[in-house]
Image: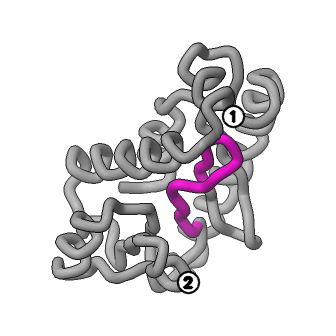
Amino acid sequence: MDAEWLRKVCLSFPGTTEQIQWGCDLVFKVGGKMYAVTPLEPAPVCLSFKAAPEKFAELTERQDIIPAPYLARAQWVALQTRDAIGGEELAGLLRESYEMILTKLPKKMREGISSGKGAGLGTRGMTRQKSGQNQRAVKKMTGRRKSKARG
């Protein structure tokens, strides 16, 4: 799992937007509410996402998965290593996180997202533009991370 794989998975969910927040974290949102966060620079955790209560307990018993700092009370988990969960399982868990957030959005917003008439907040054109800007920022930051690791 790397930032590009994560972007591909999350942006495949209808209405998902992404933005760089808190300096160097890539945040995925639906309807303006976040459902996954990954740091683009070295950090103690490499990905955080919301989990159903029963999954939260199950996941946090596994090696390299902890309750997410600051978000554990809202049932978020954090991966300490990129290979803590296999790609297929992780994609499913991210989908579940997205759907949990989506179901809590107002009905009108959910309907707009499912019909493709909106991307949560803002218009599709704005989302694409921001997506392009974020993609450049992600590439710049991941490139910087690689060069820091070498030196």
Quarter of the figure that contains the N terminus: bottom left
In the image, which disc is placed on residue 120?
Answer: 1
Q: How is the image coloured?
A: one colour
Q: Position of residue 38 (x, y in %)?
A: 53, 64
Determine if the magenta segment contains residue 30: yes
Q: Label 1 is placed on what type of residue? A: Gly
Point 44% across, 66% down: residue: 47
Up-down relation of residue 125 to residue 5 (above or below): above
Q: Is residue 142 covered in magenta?
A: no
Query: Residue lying farthest front?
Result: 107
Could you say whether the residue bearing mark 2 is in a helix, strand or loop? Answer: loop
What type is the residue that disc 2 sits on? Tyr
Q: Are marks 1 and 2 in contact (CB under 8 Å)?
A: no
Q: Which residue is mark 2?
A: 70
Rounded to the nearest angstrom, the CA distance separating label 1 from label 2 is: 25 Å
Q: Position of residue 141 (x, y in %)?
A: 66, 62
Main secondary structure along the magenta-highlighted residues:
strand
Q: Which residue appears at 64% of the width and 38% of the height?
A: 106
Q: Which is nearer the eye, 82 or 108? A: 108
Along the line of sight, the residue nearer the viewer: 122 or 45: 122
- Using residue 88 as the reference point, say whether residue 97 is left or right of it: right
Residue drawn at x 41%, y 71% is: 75
Q: Which residues are magenta?
A: 28-39
**Mark before the other along the chain sequence, 1 or 2:** 2
